[in-house]
Every structure is written in structure tokens, then in C-alpha cells.
Image (cartoon, rainbow, N blue to C red):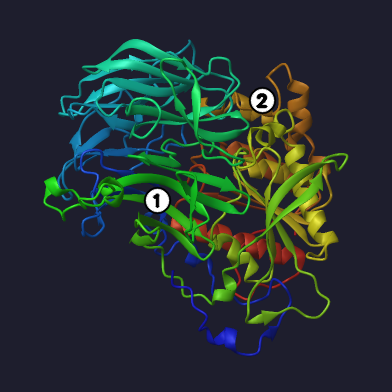
Amino acid sequence: MGATSGSGAAMSEPQVLPYGEWPSPVTAECLVQGAASISEVIADPLRPWLLWWAESRPDEAGRTAVMRCDLRGGKAQEVTPPDANVRTLVHEYGGAGWWPFDGCLYYVEFADQRLRRIDRPGEQPLLLTGEPTEPRAWRYADGRITPDGAWSVCVEERHDLSSGTGAGAEPVNRLVAVACDGSQQMRVLWSGADFVMTPRLSPDGSKLAWISWDHPNMGWDATRLHVHEFEDAQLGAELLVLGNEGDRSLCEPGWVMLSGTDSEAGSRLLVCSDHDNWWGLYEACIDSGSLLPVVIGDFDVATPPWVFGMQRWAAAGTDVAAVAARASGDQILINGRALELPDSSISSLAFARLHDPAAGGPEASETESADAAATVLAYAGAGYRHEVEVVAVRIQPDGAVERQALRSARSLDFDASLLIEPEVISFPTGAEGDETAHALYYKPANAACVAPPGELPPLLVTAHGGPTAAARRQLQLGIIYWTSRGIAVVDVDYRGSTGYGRSYRRRLEGAWGVSDVEDCIAAAQFLADRGDADPQRLIIRGGSAGGFTVLAALAFHDRFAAGASRYGIADLEALAADTHKFESRYLDRLVGPYPQAEEVYRARSPIHHIDGFDAPMIVLQGDQDKIVPPSQSEMIVEALKAKGVPVAYLLFEGEQHGFRKAGNIVVALQSELAFFGRVLGFTPAEAPVKLEISGL
């Protein structure tokens, strides 16, 4: 991380300027120039000294490339062709659009959603799946290769197969085996549920495990773990179905070779389960159907499977590593012992072998701890002073840790005073004030500036998406952009957020649009009462589900002076009738079954309560969003225009659910700052942004 304290501005006498008008080196362009989002880290099953990861790059129009690094001394290199964009659209959110095997890469191309194999960097990929009946109708995700290299077992989502009749029929999700030789042969393995995820082969290829669930559940509500015998790309006898009782979310299954346990050493199946409130890591006993604790505590190992490829545990030999998600930030536990690392947010873990004598690498130690000494733990992680990097960790016999950055974070030439760590706060909430919610509070921070005596800063309340997500425990330049200009930020983990156990996550059931809004208001009031924010300049911002929270807060309450909604939901009924399969029944739990609960839907939908809107608002939307269609944003914008409430609307061409293109990310953030400045009465230090605000 390249943050320094040598800025000339920081060393001189600070300027006295109003909050919001502080000049800052953290520009909107800083968010995208040379940036990369890194999420999945995988060790090659047959060449475990090869470590792979994916990078999504905003300054390359948001394309995703796959990288690999030889841990025996090689440098990281891109494996995918320069024009490739690795991204699957299964569940629309995607994830795990690639997987490695024996030095080869299997990946899904975003443009056509067909599966490909590439053997070496620079070579032309081989098409493995056929031409669909209509564009992107056959989609693939989350695969693993059979030990003989003949088949790729993965999730398929078919948009040209009806699970019903009529135009509204849902896509079909199933497990398939795709031939790896380019013959485009395919075998359907299983299609017994609305959703299927995480097919995982045992090391010898004799068993296949996966997760499934059905409407109206989501992958974090009630799921099933399946295990079948597997041979010649066909399922055999059923060995286990766990979770049918619906009292748990099972996720992130995986096979490992564990030793040193009470039972016979060999291939074991581990899985995360939240049946005891927290998503702990357990061994699934196939014979008895019981779960034996491996890594458990008052923390969540897993996260909600919004996307494929989430893996926050790894095991090798006698070592089991897992992420422990706590309010103050993540920790990595190895065999129950905390690994001290300067990271607070971990997205994935993988064990890899640093040396392999058979491959001509350096000789491994001949001691009894040879396996441990030759094994490294790799992860993608970020801290509050550096962005995501890929790190390999080797633990020495004396406990010392060797840490090697395989893919370093960007060098950020900012004064260290700008890169602040938030305060973890908890505060009373609820109609009676008898419940508790949580948040991360970021105070204004810029050593080059100070506010006039007696002035309190504006406070930006951020509502995360999901809504089953969480505030991110890592450096976010999108937050520092505000705090370095003198605007405080509170990132709210409202009831329903992840990281506080199943019971907290379920508190939003039947209460979406109520409890989340109460918690955002309570966070703002808590900080205003504490003297950390100007109670007359409280503003709120959120995207997707967080955008709905913004709209509901402005429609039903008068606490905020302005708001920013990114692809937010204005009409819950329209969302229930016009969204993709993955979330088509999500509202059954969050609001109620539709149409039985039609009155509740209308009562909670901001579009039906335009009379309540008085605060100015900026609305941002992608024109190709299939999850929250543009019509949702346009309904609210037109209604506000008709009422005369100040409103700005930006529609971004070519963007889907979330903005990926560098130029659009920059314009969106600059426009929000300009909008808030106009309506709150401060003038940002940067050049004015052209922004049309109706009614102002």
C-alpha cells in the first residue's frame, strides 16, 4: 500500500473551510484508475503451486480477466485473451464464471455465455458448449473438472426451457456435465429443485456434493446438501440429503483430505451451516447425517450466496482455515488460532503447495512437518489502509508468518490522515427503542482542512444493498471521497444484515421498508445527538435494496434533507411481477406472499406515497438493468417532477445492476456530490459538474 504522510498540504497550516468544501486529492477518477475488484482465489487441483484469481477492471469497461501465478517463483500473468470478459449471468448476479484444472482455464464469456477452455496464455480458446437457440439462453457457472480431465461438472441455467407454460415461465437451473474435449457433448445430471449451487467433486471423483433450494426460500434461508455417488459423468446412488427440515442454511460445501481426526483419515465433506445461529464450519458425516463442529463461534464464516464462488474456508492436511466475521472486521483462524494479518475483509481462501519436487521445484523439507511447511494459505483481502490484494501466507514452525503479495493493491499516494478506520457503533432502534442495530461511523478527516468553529458536518447515511448484505470492513475510496471533503458517513448494518448471526439476519422478515428505515434514521439521530453531525443536514444514499430504503425513508419520514437512490425499488408490486427468477419470491419473506399481501405491498411502496416526498433527490439507473428495471426509477422521477420536488435523473447506457464502466462510475459520484452541494448550500472545491435538476 502506497499511502504516505509526506503530503505538503498535510504539513502546512490547515485551511479553514466549511464542511463539504474541503479540497481533496481523492477524486472520483481515483476510484477507477488502475482499480480492480478481486473476489475469487483458487489453487489448481493438479498443479497446486499455480494460484488463480479474477480481476474486474473498471478502466477496461468493467471486463473481468483471469490471472495466475506460479508460487515457485513465477510472476502473475493474465491467462484470458485481451478481448475476453469472464462473467456468467446465472442468477443474473453471476460469480464463479471460471475454474482451473491442470494448468488449463475453463471460463464463460460474457458476450455469449458459452463455456470455453484455454490451455495456455495466448492460445485461442476451445468452445465447449453449443450455440444457444437465442442469445445468452444457455448459461454456466461454478464448475469443477473430473479427475481424469474429461468432464466439467457445473451449474446450467436454461432460458429456453419452460418450467411452466406461457411467457412468464421461469428459467430452468440444473447440474450438467460438459465434455472437455470440444465435442460439445453434455449430460444432464440433476434438475430436482428451483436452484442449484456449488457442485463439488470428491478428490477421487467418486462422489458429488451440491446445494439446492426452492421458492420462496433464498440461499441463506433454507437449503439442502446433497451427496451422490458419481461415475463416468453420471450420478449414482443417493448418499445424503441434509436440511430438508428447513431450519438451516447450508452453503460452501467442499471435499478435503483431512487427517489426525478420531475417525479414519480420508476424504471428508465440510460445509457451513447456521443451524446454531452462526454460520459455522462443520464436517458432514455421510453415514449418520450429523454435523460435527470444525470451526464455530459467535461469528459467521460464510456470507449470503448472492453470487457463486464464495469460499471463506480452506483445508489441507491437518490445517483448517476459516474466516471469522466480526463487527470490527474479519479474522482468519487456522486450527482455531487467529492469524495476525493487516486485513479486515477477506473474500476467499485457498490452500496451495508452495513446492512440488515432482514438478522440478525446490525440495520440500524432510521433517515430519513437511506437508505443513510446503503449504501456503492464499487469500484475497483488504484492510482499512489498502485495497484488495492477493496474498500467500506461509507459517514457519516457530509461528512466524511469511507474507507475500502475489497481486499487490494499488499504490495510493494519499496522506495517511485521509485513510481512516471507522468507529464501530451500536445504537437503540425500533418503534419502542428496545432493539439494537449496528453501523460503521467515518468522521470527516483531512489534515489540510479544518471547519469553522462551531460548525457541525453534514452526515451521509449509507444503506447497503441486498438487503441481506453488510457494511464492508475495508478501505473504500467511495467513502473517503466524502469524508476527505468534510462530510461524515455512517454505513448502517440495519436489522437483516449479515455478520451478526441468523437471528439478526431474520429480523427483517416481514419488515422490509420499516426496520431498515428505522435503523438508518436511528443511526443518524444517534450521531446528531452525540454532536457528530448537523441535524439539519442529514442525507441518505443507497443502491438496489438500499435504494428502496432511501425512497421509503424520504416517502414516510421527514428526517433527511436529501437523498440519492441508485437503481432503487419504487414499486414493490412491480418488482414482484417483473424481476428475475433468483429474487422472484424474495419478497415473500421480506414483505409477504403476493398477491395475498397486496395491501402491504402498496402500503410500503414509495410510488404510492408521493405526497410524502418533500426532500430533493438524485436518481441513477442503468438502462439494461434486469433486476430493477429502469421503469422503477422513471416512475418515481416523473412523480416527483409532477409534484415539483427537486429531482435529478441520470440514465447510464449499457449498464446493468450496478455500474461497471469507469466513466459512468466517475460521473455518478461527481453528480451526487454536486447535487448534495446544490441542495444543502455548500460549494464543492472541484470544477462544477453539469447537472440538470428539475424543480430547483
Disc sitting over residue 379 in the figure:
1
- What numbered label is drawn on residue 599? none
User: Is residue 10 found left or right of 527 in the rendered image?
Assistant: left
Neighbour tally class for label 2: few under 14, some 14-19, many 20 plus, Cα within 10 Å = some
In what quadrant of the picture does the C terminus appear? bottom right
Where is residue 148? Give x, y as percent. Answer: 17, 28
- The amino acid marked with disc number 2 is Arg
Q: How many marks?
A: 2
Name the residue rendered at 65%, 44% in the picture: 547
Q: Nearer the viewer, residue 447 or 347?
A: 347
Q: Is residue 295 left or right of residue 365?
A: right
Nearest to the observer: residue 292 or residue 483: 292
The relative height of residue 596 versus residue 390 in the rendered view (above or below) is above
Q: Quadrant of the N terminus?
A: bottom left
Mark 2 vs 1: CB contact within 8 A: no
Label 2 sits on a secondary structure element that is: helix
Precedes in sequence: disc 2 or disc 1: 1
Q: Is residue 626 visible?
A: no
Q: Nearer the viewer, residue 619 or 18?
A: 18
Query: Where residue 188 sits in the image (x, y, percent)?
Result: 31, 16
The Cα atoms of the two marked residues, 2 and 1, are separated by 34 Å
Describe the element under mark 1 as helix, strand or loop. strand
Question: Residue 533 appears at what percent x and percent y?
Answer: 78, 64
* Residue 589, disc: 2
* Numbered disc in front, either 2 or 1: 1
Picture layout, residue 467 above or below residue 676: above
Residue 15 location, x and y as percent?
68, 85
On the image, which quarter does residue 275 sit in? top right
Q: Residue at x 71, y 46 (%)?
A: 550
